[in-house]
């Protein structure tokens, strides 16, 4: 029983939910489950994997923002200037 408890606490400490990357909690029987989805989870992913993916996602976001800025054209004009251009 001691090995099982140690193994589940290591899972809780080193892994996150594979669906939503949230923390794992221990049920009364000692089984690790997703804090958000409960027993409806499909496994675990390591914390290092989640950290790496979050860094990659941040880089992807930065690249997309840079590449799409000409298309998205964030407006630097005031509301009054825009209304004046529209003839109001």
Image (cartoon, rainbow, N blue to C red):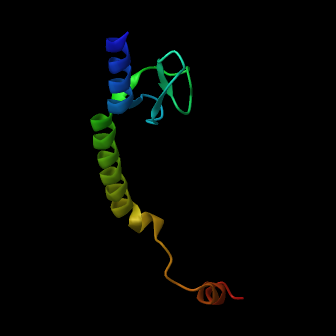
- From this viewpoint, which residue is outermost toward the right? 88
Q: Quadrant of residue 65?
A: bottom left
Which quadrant is the N terminus positioned in? top left
- From this viewpoint, which residue is outermost toward the front? 2
**Residue 18 at what x, y percent from top left?**
42, 28
Relative placement, left or right, of 33 versus 11 is: right
For the point 46% across and 70% down, which residue is it? 73
**Residue 62 at what x, y percent from top left?**
34, 58
Foreground of the two, 10 or 58? 10
Foreground of the two, 80 or 1? 1
For the point 56% across and 25% down, which residue is it? 38
Relative placement, left or right, of 30 versus 57 is: right
Which quadrant is the C terminus positioned in? bottom right
Foreground of the two, 16 or 79? 16
For the point 37% across and 25% down, which residue is it? 9
Foreground of the two, 34 or 62? 34
Relative to 19, is 29 above or below? Answer: above
- From this viewpoint, which residue is outermost toward the top? 1
Relative placement, left or right, of 63 versus 22 is: left
**Residue 32 at what x, y percent from top left?**
46, 22
Relative to 15, is 83 above or below? Answer: below
Q: How many marks?
A: 0
Relative placement, left or right, of 72 versus 7 is: right
């Amino acid at each position: 029983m001691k090995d099982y408890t140690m193994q589940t606490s290591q899972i809780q400490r080193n892994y996150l939910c594979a669906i939503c990357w949230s923390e794992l909690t221990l049920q009364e029987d000692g089984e690790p489950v997703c804090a958000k989805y409960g027993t409806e989870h499909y496994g675990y992913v390591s914390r290092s994997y989640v950290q790496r993916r979050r860094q990659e996602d941040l880089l992807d976001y930065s690249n997309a923002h840079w590449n799409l800025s000409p298309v998205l054209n964030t407006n630097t004009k005031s509301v009054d200037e825009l209304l004046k251009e529209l003839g109001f």
